[in-house]
Image (cartoon, grey):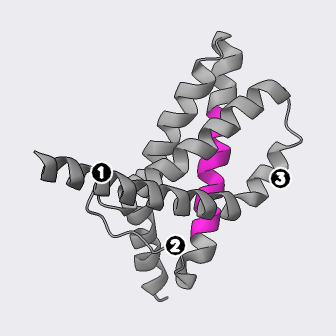
Amino acid sequence: MVRRVARAIRRFDRYLSRSLTAGMEVSALAVPTLWFLLFARPAEAVALSALTALCATPLAVAAFRGGYVSDARWPAPGHLGTLAGRSAYYSLVVGGGTYLGVAAQLRWESFALGVVVPAVACVVAVSALPRAFRAFARLSRLSL
């Protein structure tokens, strides 16, 4: 029993470490989108949904990259070959999640949707990252 608890604690510690690394990665690579979101209106709805998207995305990246949810091959945080692609992808995920959250808040006038919608949208979008990168790699190998 003690060993199981110790293993669970080590596993959670690894996940926490991965999520902090993913948080730094996503926050740094999504700066272009975050810059544009500073000027978006209505500011309250945008801030709530953007903060949710910016919190949910690194947690999902850490879960997928660490193999806690999926066994897909994820690019390492420092992999330079995928840096531009990850920056674009994370920016689209955070921006898209924010947009969907704000739209849901304004449509149904519920701030709870400004949290739930971006969280779900970002997790779903992040789960597709390895497949999107593989498809892009296949497309880039095609010749005319």
Query: Which residue appears at 40% of the width and 78% of the height?
Result: 138
Q: Position of residue 129 (x, y in %)?
A: 45, 60
In this view, the residue farthest toward the left is 1
The answer to whether 10 is drawn above or below residue 113 in the figure is: below
Residue 73, numbered label = none
The magenta stretch is 86-100
The quadrant holding residue 40 is: top right
Identity of the amino acid at label 2? Pro
The residue carrying pointer 2 sits among few (fewer than 14), some (14 to 19) or many (20 or more) residues within 10 Å by Cα, namely some
The residue carrying pointer 1 sits among few (fewer than 14), some (14 to 19) or many (20 or more) residues within 10 Å by Cα, namely few
Tag 1 residue: 9
Tag 2 residue: 77
The quadrant holding residue 117 is: top right
Query: As drawn, is 17 to the left or to the right of 83?
Result: left
The answer to whether residue 56 is seen in the rendering is yes
Q: Main secondary structure of the magenta part?
A: helix
Query: Which residue appears at 65% of the width and 17% of the height?
Result: 111
Query: Which residue appears at 69% of the width and 63% of the height?
Result: 28
The answer to whether 17 is drawn above or below residue 12 in the figure is: below
Tag 3 residue: 35
